[in-house]
Image (cartoon, helix red, strand yellow):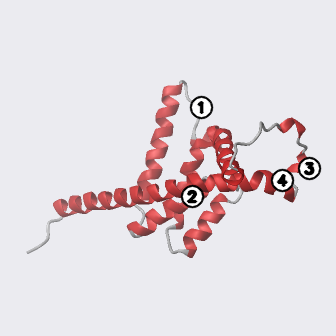
């Protein structure tokens, strides 16, 4: 599946060029959706918000449901979650920073060094783990998700409006009104 989207290239520069074309293609699909600009921007903001959450298997589903519930574009929400997942190689760093910020907000001190060596797989699936690790992680993700989603809303709204103004101006040049 991954190789269908990004086939193996000869060099890194060619791979990056193909990757950038893919991102630009997603952005073009986003601005050319047939929804109102507010709905598209709202969907992007919702997608970016859930993109920061540590709820790995639920991000896309939650973005779809919330976008549908508040009458925003579910397609733009899914595209935004997908674009957010580009940072997947850096996810351990983001999760660590989100955990540290959340821990600091709860305890007013930074967490002690965390070691996975003393943790068993069964410990991850216990409710107490949510309160010790999950709650600070979720709280820390909110600190980054809220400003990013607000910024992405206004940026997307402006981009969609400009794209549509240019498109409409181009159509007026091609088909002048009959008088």
Q: Looking at the image, do the residues carrying marks 4 and 1 touch, with CB atoms under 8 Å apart?
A: no
Camera-side mark, 4 or 3 = 4
Among the two numbered marks 2 and 4 on one chain, the one whose residue lies closer to the N terminus: 2
Does label 4 or label 3 sit earlier along the sequence? 3
Q: Where is residue 87 in the image (x, y as percent from the top left)?
A: 58, 42
Picture residue at 83% right of the left edge, 53% below the top = 129
Tell me if label 4 and label 3 are in contact, CB under 8 Å: no
Camera-nearest label, 2 or 4? 4
* Residue behind mark 2: 49
What residue would you read off at disc 1?
8
Residue 27 spot, x, y in % from top left: 44, 51
Ranked by sequence position, the earlier of labels 3 and 2 is 2
Q: How far apart are marks 2 and 4 (CA)?
A: 23 Å
Alpha-carbon span between mark 3 and mark 2: 30 Å
Q: Is mark 2 on a helix, strand or loop?
A: helix
Q: Quadrant of residue 63?
A: bottom right
User: Does the residue at mark 3 contact the one at mark 1 (Cβ under 8 Å)?
Assistant: no
Circle 3 is placed at which residue position? Answer: 122
Q: Specify whether 68 is left or right of 104.
A: left
Q: Which mark is residue 85?
A: none
Q: Are marks 1 and 2 in contact (CB under 8 Å)?
A: no
Q: Earlier in the sequence, mark 4 or mark 1?
A: 1
Q: Using the image as rendered, state which of residue 13 and residue 53 is in the foreground.
A: 53
Q: Is mark 1 on a helix, strand or loop?
A: loop
């Amino acid at each position: 599946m991954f190789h269908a989207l990004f086939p193996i290239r000869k060099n890194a520069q060619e791979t990056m060029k193909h990757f950038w074309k893919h991102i630009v293609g997603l952005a073009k699909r986003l601005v050319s959706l047939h929804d109102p600009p507010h709905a598209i921007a709202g969907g992007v903001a919702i997608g970016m918000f859930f993109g920061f959450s540590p709820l790995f298997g639920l991000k896309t589903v939650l973005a779809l449901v919330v976008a549908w519930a508040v009458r925003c574009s579910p397609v733009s929400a899914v595209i935004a979650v997908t674009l957010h997942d580009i940072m997947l190689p850096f996810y351990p760093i983001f999760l660590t920073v989100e955990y540290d910020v959340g821990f600091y907000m709860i305890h007013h001190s930074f967490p002690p060094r965390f070691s996975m060596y003393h943790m068993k797989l069964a410990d991850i699936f216990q409710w107490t783990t949510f309160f010790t690790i999950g709650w600070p992680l979720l709280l820390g993700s909110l600190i980054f998700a809220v400003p990013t989603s607000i910024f992405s809303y206004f940026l997307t709204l402006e981009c969609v409006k400009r794209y549509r103004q240019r498109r409409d101006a181009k159509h007026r040049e091609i088909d002048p009104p009959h008088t």
